[in-house]
């Protein structure tokens, strides 16, 4: 179960079915924070892929030079 589902279950237990505006605002803030974190991870992942490609290009060049 993800955080959102857990939060929704917690809100529904013992409360009216419709979430309160404070609960919605808290969940929206959590979603925004998680989206920002995902965006950071995407940038990091792209950079890792670039570095990986660069390392293998350099290794291939070195192998050609050694022959």
Image: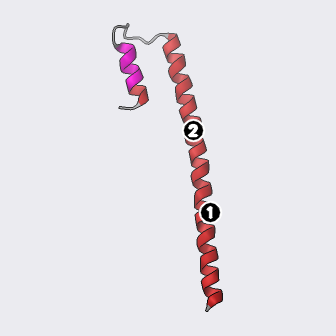
On the image, the x and y values in percent for residue 16 come to 37, 7
Residue at the (53%, 19%) spot, across then down: 26
Instruction: Work out how far the residue at label 2 is from the one at label 1, CA to CA, in angstroms.
Output: 21 Å
On the image, the x and y values in percent for residue 17 come to 37, 11
Residue at the (58%, 60%) spot, across then down: 49
Q: Quadrant of the C terminus?
A: bottom right
Give the left or right position of residue 43, taking residue 27 as reference.
right
Please give the range of residues in magenta. 6-12
Residue under numbered circle 1: 51
Residue at the (59%, 36%) spot, across then down: 36
Which residue is most to the front? 66
The answer to whether 28 is drawn above or below residue 36 in the figure is: above
Within the magenta stretch, is there residue 25? no
On the image, the x and y values in percent for residue 13 come to 33, 12
Residue under numbered circle 2: 37
Q: Residues within 10 Å of mark 1 (few under 14, many from 20)?
A: few
Residue at the (53%, 23%) spot, across then down: 28
Q: Quadrant of the N terminus?
A: top left
**Helix, strand or loop: magenta stretch:** helix
């Amino acid at each position: 179960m993800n955080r959102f589902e857990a939060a929704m279950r917690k809100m529904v237990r013992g409360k009216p079915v419709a979430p309160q505006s404070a609960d919605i605002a808290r969940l929206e803030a959590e979603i925004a924070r998680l989206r920002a974190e995902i965006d950071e991870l995407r940038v990091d992942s792209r950079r890792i892929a670039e570095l990986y490609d660069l390392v293998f290009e350099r290794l291939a060049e070195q192998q050609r030079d050694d022959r």
